[in-house]
Image (cartoon, rainbow, N blue to C red):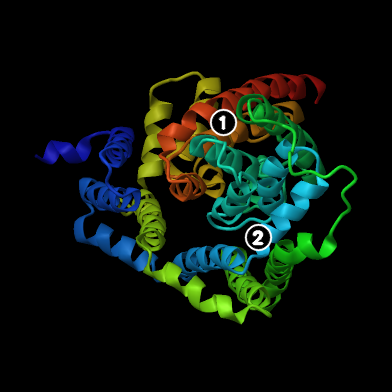
Amino acid sequence: MDWLLYIPAYIKVGSSFLGILLLYRLKAPLGAAILFFSILLTLWTGTGRQGLLFQIESFALPQNYLLPLIILLLLFFTDALNKTGRMARTIAALKSWLKSRHLVLAGLPALVGLLPMPAGALFSAPFVDAVDHGQEIEPQRKAAINYWFRHIWEYWWPLYPGVILAMQYSGLPALKFFLIQLPFTFAAILGGRLFILRKIRQSNDDHVSGGCFDAAAVFSALGPIGLLIAISLAGSALLPRIGIGGTLANLVAMVAGLAAALATVFMGRASSFGPTLLMLKQANTWLMIILVIGIQAFAAALSCPLDASGSTLITGMRDEFIRTGVPLIVVIMLIPFISGMVTGVAFGFVGASFPIVFALLGSNPSPGVAAATTAFAYTFGYMGMMLSPMHACFVVTAEYFKTSVFGVYRYIIGPAFVMLLTSFLLSALYLYIF
């Protein structure tokens, strides 16, 4: 049976990936399926007890044990906005003020998307659901709206770690990076409009002609959200000055922001605290936490050292693709895309693929080649991430709307195609003009 250990890394990871999807299709909780195959994948690498200990020890890292806490607080926060009536009041005011239902549906998750947060689509999902008070829109489409428009900024928005990392590996000046990546946000809006929003009734029947902007009602829910954003941004900027940096600074700031926002939500509405606590008794709450833990365990399996040289499953897949003699442009497409599918996070696909992609270009690529490659590789990686059932935002959105990720695919395949086509066109343009 030793021959099993020498099976190529891409087959091991691909088989585990398909196994997760199969168990999910068979109605197993997705978190449990991911956790099971993360353990199985570690055993398959031959690292045995050492690999399992690496997975367990990864949860001793503050950024790993804080993440489930943040997800739990986010679930509590969104439920609190509902139980206190703040969300209903804000949605009613926005619908009365804005004429376009499309603008409200897409704008709320896009607004929340300006703030990087773990499984942030879970934060905006209740807003999208509240807009559809008549339950006219099928759950799969609502999940697609929330998921897609939540992620229109991460091509260039500098608060996202993946963007910062991509900028570092590409070697492009910040301004140039932002300029070449900004058009992808407009392409994402267009794709979402054409394939997700198009068949939804656009007029807002609740809109009152000449309705005024009710600031108190609008900020009933948006106020606590704004406080959360402000504290999170301030904390992520200030904490590095006292030695807490990187992802940890963002997570610590998020915990502080959530604590302050929750205090604001219950201000004058203390009677809603008890009913909100009942969410801790719901099975879906803890299935969500298991899901987050499963994703973290799978990520640890991918990054576990396999030998003394420090090689991992990710580096193994990289080397296997390069040895096959695949054309360079296909490698630049495949490695980021597969990394995005496997890791489910932008920081993950950039960290796993960009060092490889830019190493293949040589030491001094021309400005045109660097710009074109950055746009091309990032978009393919990002679409891999957006289509990945390993992406926490994707799965928590599907779980929230009580649908499967497979049902959501038919709505996001079209916008994803628009993005990939845009990457071909813009990359060719950048190669020419730079």
Q: Position of residue 311 (x, y in %)?
A: 37, 47
Q: Is residue 73 visible?
A: yes
- The Cα–Cα distance between marks 1 and 2, rounded to whole angstroms, is 36 Å
> Does 419 appear above or below 91?
above
> Does 157 appear above or below 412?
below
What residue is shown with label 2?
A: 87
In the picture, which quadrant includes the C terminus?
Answer: top right
Q: Position of residue 39 (x, y in %)?
A: 25, 53
- In this rendered view, identify the residue nearer to me: 300 or 322: 300
Residue drawn at point x = 68 percent, y = 41 percent: 106
Look at label 2 and name its amino acid.
Met
Q: Position of residue 432 (x, y in %)?
A: 78, 19
Structural crowding at the residue carrying mark 2, measured as other residues with C-alpha within 10 Å and reported as few (<14), some (14–19) or many (≥20): many
Circle 1 SS class: helix
Look at label 1 and name its amino acid.
Phe
Residue drawn at point x = 61 percent, y = 50 percent: 130
What residue is shown with label 1?
A: 380
Circle 2 SS class: helix
Q: Which mark is residue 241?
A: none
Q: Is residue 421 left or right of residue 220?
A: left
Q: Position of residue 85 (x, y in %)?
A: 64, 65
- In this rendered view, identify the residue nearer to me: 31 or 359: 31
Residue drawn at point x = 57 percent, y = 62 percent: 78
Structural crowding at the residue carrying mark 1, measured as other residues with C-alpha within 10 Å and reported as few (<14), some (14–19) or many (≥20): many
- Which comes sooner in the sequence, label 1 or label 2? 2
> Does 162 appear above or below 202?
below
- In this rendered view, identify the residue nearer to me: 147 or 219: 219
Residue drawn at point x = 37 percent, y = 48 percent: 302
Quarter holding residue 378: top right
In the picture, which quadrant includes the N terminus?
Answer: top left
